[in-house]
Image (cartoon, grey):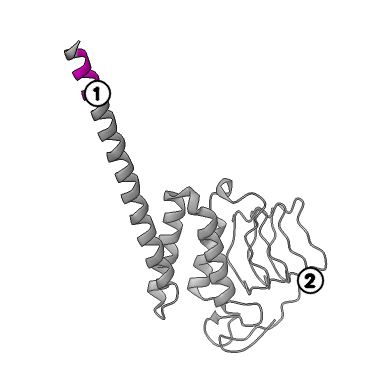
Amino acid sequence: MMTTVATIAALWFTSESLRATKNQYALSQQTVVTDRFHKAVEHLTVDKLEARLSALYLLERLAKDSPVDHPTIYSILASFVHTQSPVWHCRLVGRPGDRGRLEFDVQTAITVIGRRDVTRDAPGTDIDLSDTCLFGARLRGADLRGVDLSGTNLTGADLSHANLTGATLERANLSDTRLDDTDLTGANLLEANLSRDTEPVTRSGDHTR
């Protein structure tokens, strides 16, 4: 009987030790994720382009590693686009005389958003890219289901083969936008501009809508 009791006690102790170790490991992993998250968010605000690009890719990786943080991370990425490229202030780069293209960090942010795992999006919560400047954005094949793009300047953007099912494009400027094989099932296109006339857009520092 004493042997049996000792064996049960040993098994219980081992089980509790393993549970404690597992909990400690989980806590350690969460601490690492939190530290990486804060570091990435901080780097989004620095002046160096390389640091911002690194932060964007790090956030994408964190969203994959931590599904519970997925909605928060993509909300932050959308806010980054709002801050860096509002519809009234297109930050474009390129040689004088060219049509221009989005700044690399803005293009990277929307590229990351367009290849996210949409099954991890928070139910009933759309990614908000409304009233942003996505002039000439390269979003071929992007998954933009349910994304709010109302009032957004998508002039000259490439949305071919993109999935815009249920997206909000009300008042969006889609002039000269490529929509080859784009899935617009259930999309809201009320008052959207679908003309083929491209309005001139100025470089970074000037204002345009």
The C terminus lies in which quarter of the figure? bottom right
Could you say whether the residue bearing mark 2 is in a helix, strand or loop? loop
Residue 97, picture quadrant? bottom right
Relative placement, left or right, of 41 versus 82 is left
Whether 178 is drawn above or below 4: the answer is below
**Principal secondary structure, stretch drawn in magenta:** helix
Residue positioned 71% across, 57% down in the render: 167
Vertical relation: 33 (above or below) 95: above
Q: Position of residue 197 (x, y in %)?
A: 76, 76
Earlier-in-chain disc, 1 versus 2: 1
The picture quadrant where one finds residue 14 is top left
Residue 51: x, y in percent?
38, 72
The residue at the far right in this view is 191
The residue carrying mark 2 is: 195
Occupied quadrant, residue 161: bottom right
Q: What range of the chain is rendered magenta?
A: 4-10
Residue 134: x, y in percent? 62, 71
- Dot 1: within a 10 Å radius of its alpha carbon, few (fewer than 14), some, or many (20 or more) residues? few
Identity of the residue drawn at 64% across and 61% down: 159
Q: Residue furthest left?
A: 3
Residue nearest the observer in this picture, 152 or 161 = 152
Q: In which quarter of the image is the N terminus?
A: top left
Residue shown at 55% from the left, 55% from the top: 71
Which of discs 1 and 2 lies nearer the camera? The answer is: 1
For disc 1, the marked residue is: 11
- C-alpha separation, residue under disc 1 versus residue under disc 2: 73 Å
Q: What residue type is labelled 1?
A: Leu
Q: What element carries label 1?
A: helix
Disc 1 and disc 2 in contact, CB within 8 angstroms = no
Q: Which amino acid does label 2 sit on?
A: Ser
